[in-house]
Amino acid sequence: MSVPVTHPQVGLRGRDRERAVLEGVLAQARSGSSAVLVLRGEAGIGKTALLDHAGHTAVGFRTVGVTGVESEMELPFAGLHQLCAPLLGGLRRLPAPQHDALSVAFALREGKAPNRFLVGLAVLGLLAGAAEDRPLLCLVDDAQWLDEASRQVLAFAARRLMAEPVALIFAVRDAPGDHEPAGLPELVVEGLSEPDARALLASTLRAPLDPLVRDRIVAEAHGNPMALLHLPRVPAELAGGFWLASGRPLASCLENAFYQQFRSLPGDSRRLLLTAAADPTGDACLLRRAAALQGIPPDAAAPAEAAGLVEFGTSVRFHHPLVRSAVYHRTSAPDRRAAHRALTEATDPGLDPDRRAWHRAHAAASPDESVALDLERSAGRARSRGGVAAEASFLQGAAELTPDPARRAIRALAAAQAHIDAGGADQADNLLAVAEAGPLDDLQRARLERLRARLVFSQVRGSEAPRLLLDAAHRLAPLDAALARDTLLEAAGAAIYAGRLSEGPGQREVAEAVRAGPPPPTPPRTVDVLLDSVAGRIIDGYPAGIEALRRAQHAVRQEQKPAAAEADMRWLWLACRVTPEPLAPELWDDDAWYELGTGAVALAREAGALAVLPMALSYQACFQVHAGELDTAAALIDEATAISQAVGGVPMMYASLVLAAWRGRESRALDLISTTVEEVRARGEGRSLALAEYATALLYNGLGRYDDALSAALRACRFEDLGFYGWALTELIEAAVRSGRPETAVAPLATLTERTRAGGTPWALGVGACSQALMSDDRAADALYREAVEHLGRCRITVHLARARLLYGEWLRRRNRRQESRAQLGPAYELFNRSGAEAFAERARRELLATGETVRKRTVGVLDELTSQESQIARLAGDGNTNGEIAAQLFISPRTVEWHLGNVFAKLGVSSRRHLRTVLSSPRQPEAPRG
């Protein structure tokens, strides 16, 4: 990493708009509120100069900065470490888990792999602590070249900063991509206007220039300040006043201009500058040692500094990242290797073994087992520091430098596995090709097939993945039974995801392969219990398979015990992936659903589990929707989405679809459903397509548009998708009866009744009785509705209780039993109204009006005035949590919690947490009377 030397005039001519935005960012931070900005533009457009301008004008700020270097993207937390190094005096003030995680990430101490969330929280606390006395300005240039770990943590912090006097400004190259902080406020830095471009060009010319050539340079530079400043310095480009256009991309032309300046330097200066370019740290002491090892005299620095290419001081600073790129990439390979050899010898193997191994690898001219072994060891250390991408990169380097073909193939497999875990699909594919060309034994070749199948599944969940995974499992079966069963579970998951869109083996074929495959060990692992139960459910049907599902659910619940917490994070994730709306809803077990959801979130928060927490939050949110706590569900979904975005994941859509349908806001819900259908169809996720149809049916039943609801429900029920098929059947039955087509509901009712009787829980029995009542004559219907209300009153699924009361009340009113009807419709309306299920609440209100009841329209609760995050913080504060505890739970800073609570107190008119608890427990107030 290095900080560039900048010239204030570069790119600032005609930059009034950009400077005004930067001044606004600084003013916001001065006022005590965090401000984040991404400057986006092509190379040389002036982003670095704008960062430098921000640094110079940030009077009263403490300023820290870092510049990403492309060659250092492999080293975990390298960029973050340099940015935070001046702030590490505040490390001791962090909570112990955060202190330890950041210390391990920065290699300040040894320990188990730090969790990214804990590192993110630590950085959040470090920035907030540094800004207590005066505002803090963080400048990140070439952010697209930061290592993945640093990029994720900084993006996490940028999204969670809110009430701290911190300004965080990133500069990134043109188009959005995977290697930059996405989803943050942006300012596109465009080219200079033609008058400003002409003036800037004129200021650089040292000799007359033909007017037509001048006009052409201005036109083809497109207002790029770096091009206007540096291209005219290259005599060959001007050709005696008549410019020769090269047709190369602008960045390439700029690199060439810098390289021509580099070539004009004395030989020792060129070697010194190349050595500096080969070391991303900008460590002046290291550079001096490496220079001495090459016999480069100290005075070699002067010509390079005089040319304006670099500045040597306490650190090495290049004028622009393109200078480093031009010097390094346009120099011959033997010269680059010589520079890396010197840096290898100059790097202390005890203090920085990984960077030494990195330099040693770049110095190698041919495969070398000792170098490969060094990289392999560095890969292990990288993983222990939480750098999965770095581990993959080191393993890839080790494979490339391994001379023995057999060992190279083994290392290529390991590197491919690491790249798949890190999301590096292209690299994994290339490494699998390397491994395939090697002398693999049968087990290694079977492992290769499994990795290739997993790679396909990670990219497109439907498509070929089930077939490839099943083929890999068959090949593994006689060689490694445990790995074969793991692969069969992955195949089952792929088939479940593909659902109706499967192009390969379906769920039943995979389940039959499980039964015919290797038996489970004794005692069985959680994965074995889960695998056998899913296979039994698919082959034997719901009634026969339900006991096996209960055993699997029990095994997963046991994994949530404190003594098995680490194992739970692994197998709970696996359970969620195999049955994305997991086991409890399939079993109609609301108690287990509540316990698993609450426990998963608590354990994931405590461990900071990167892969599990958004999934666990989504799982808990879906439960909260069914429990009638739609505001709580929305806050959980917001948190899950924010965390997924912060770490570059894909937001979980299941709970969002169900929440939108229960909310009943037609336009918003249909927009979300339409977007989801388009995305999942492209990925081949038939199961998600069915969930979208279920949500559509639920939405239309709430709106009273039963024909539309029936059409959607019929589409949802064409394939038996695990987890919500029973829910879809209930929507189909209600829509069919209400649209005058009860014959359509006969077979679905038989299927649902079989399932709910086998389930046997109050939730199952209540839903079954309610659906039977819809299809029964008057005498039977009355008793069945009462039975449904009684059963559902004994479970946590409030919205289904309200649905049962609504249907019973509608039935009673149509039989002129108005008094009894009001006794059901009133509580139904109150439940829907309190929960925020607007369409169903309006349906119940209309029914009440038809009975002659005076009904007030939807009431306003105390939380309706709050944002979803304010609501969540208000609840946590009302439950007695401190600001620090709330901050740790929601991955924000205590100061942000304090700021949110200030807004909550102002909106609700309270002055203390005790008063807040009282207000939160009060009922909703009516908006306006309606008769």
Image (cartoon, rainbow, N blue to C red):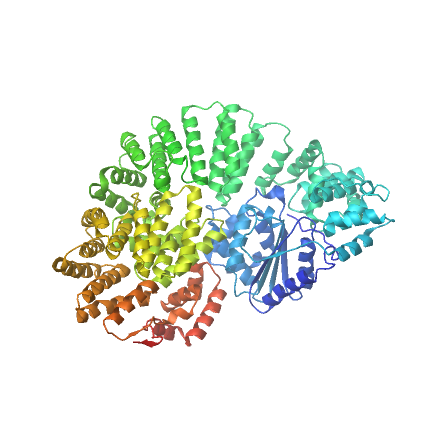
Judge by depth and name the residue closer to the eye, 133 or 473.
473
Residue 753 shown left or right of residue 208 in the figure: left
In this view, 388 is above or below 663:
above
Residue toward you, 604 or 669: 669
Give me the residue at 44% from left, 49% from top. Answer: 610
Work out whether residue 892 can be spotted: yes
Residue furthest to the front = 740
Q: How many numbered circles are shown?
A: 0
Residue 868 placement (x, y as % from top left): 42, 64
Residue 734 place in picture, x, y as percent: 25, 55
Above/below status of 478 relative to 611: above
Q: Residue at x 41, y 48 (%)?
A: 677
**Left or right relative to 853: residue 88:** right
**Position in image of residue 121 (x %, y %):** 49, 56
Q: Is residue 202 left or right of residue 523?
A: right
Single out the residue that lies furthest toward the left: 779
Task: Give residue 775's position: percent from left, percent from top.
Answer: 18, 54
Quadrant in the rendering for residue 555: top left
Q: Quadrant of residue 324?
A: top right
The answer, for residue 603, to whether it is visible in the render is no
- The quarter of the image holding the C terminus is bottom left
Quarter-of-image position of residue 250: top right
